[in-house]
Image: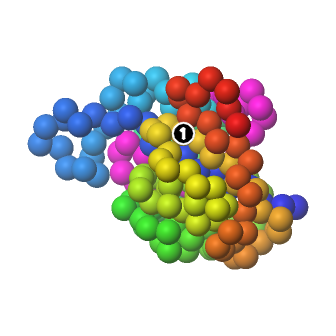
Amino acid sequence: MAKQLVLVRHGKSDWAASGTADFDRPLNHRGNKNAPEMAERMSKRELIPELLVSSPAKRALTTAKHFAETWNIPKESILKEPSIYEANTNALLAVVNKLDPQYDRVALFGHNPGLTDFLNYLADAHIYNLPTASVVYIDFPFDDWSLVSHHTGSLWLFDYPKNTDPV
């Protein structure tokens, strides 16, 4: 079966959390509201991934937990991948290329600018910026994650909290 990668940028974070290291920044009110809303939009389309892989940074992991809860996926099953934090395209590609082929739809929860760059690398999508809590689905015409590379994917869906007309 073909593969589908879901890229999810973490929800809006709390920059006012003074004295907090970047890695430990929490989601703010809007981030905690938008993440479950976006998960519900994907749920209504029956687009629930089989595997969730997240940066261990607090804001990304909290976003992943909101999605997991909405999708009735045990939060404990979220894979924490340290290399996603502050990742560039090569680091994200390495994560995807080593995914277990038994999973056909996988969600990756991470950060900008890495996720936006990665989307454009995979799908030649020309997206300038993935807003916080945005969700992107990229289709690949093969059944092995190790084949994912430059421009091998097609952007299938791009949605974000303020979007009134998901593509």
Q: Quadrant of the C terminus?
A: top right
Q: Amino acid at mark 1?
A: Ser
Seen as rendered, the residue at the extreme left is 19
Place of residue 139 in the rendered image (x, y in percent of width and height, measured from the top left): 76, 56
* 86 lies left or right of 69: left
- Compared with 124, 73 (above or below) is above
Near mark 1 (Cα within 10 A), the count class, few <14, some 14-19 or many ≥20, is: many
* 83 lies left or right of 18: right
Say which residue appears at 28% left-offset and 34% top-offset. Answer: 14
Q: Quadrant of residue 134?
A: top right
Would you say residue 106 is visible in this rendering?
no
Say which residue appears at 36% left-offset and 51% top-offset. Answer: 57
Q: How is the image coloured?
A: rainbow
Q: Which residues are magenta?
A: 40-60
Say which residue appears at 51% left-offset and 31% top-offset. Answer: 35
Would you say residue 7 is visible in this rendering?
yes
Q: Nearer the viewer, residue 74 or 142?
A: 142
The residue tagged 1 is 134
Say which residue appears at 43% left-offset and 46% top-offset. Answer: 60
Q: Nearer the viewer, residue 101 or 31?
A: 31
- Compared with 73, 126 (above or below) is below
Place of residue 21 in the rendered image (x, y in percent of width and height, measured from the top left): 20, 49
* 40 lies left or right of 133: right
- Compared with 87, 45 (above or below) is above
Q: Quadrant of the N terminus?
A: bottom right
* Magenta stretch holds residue 109: no
* Magenta stretch holds residue 43: yes
Secondary structure category for the residue under label 1 = loop
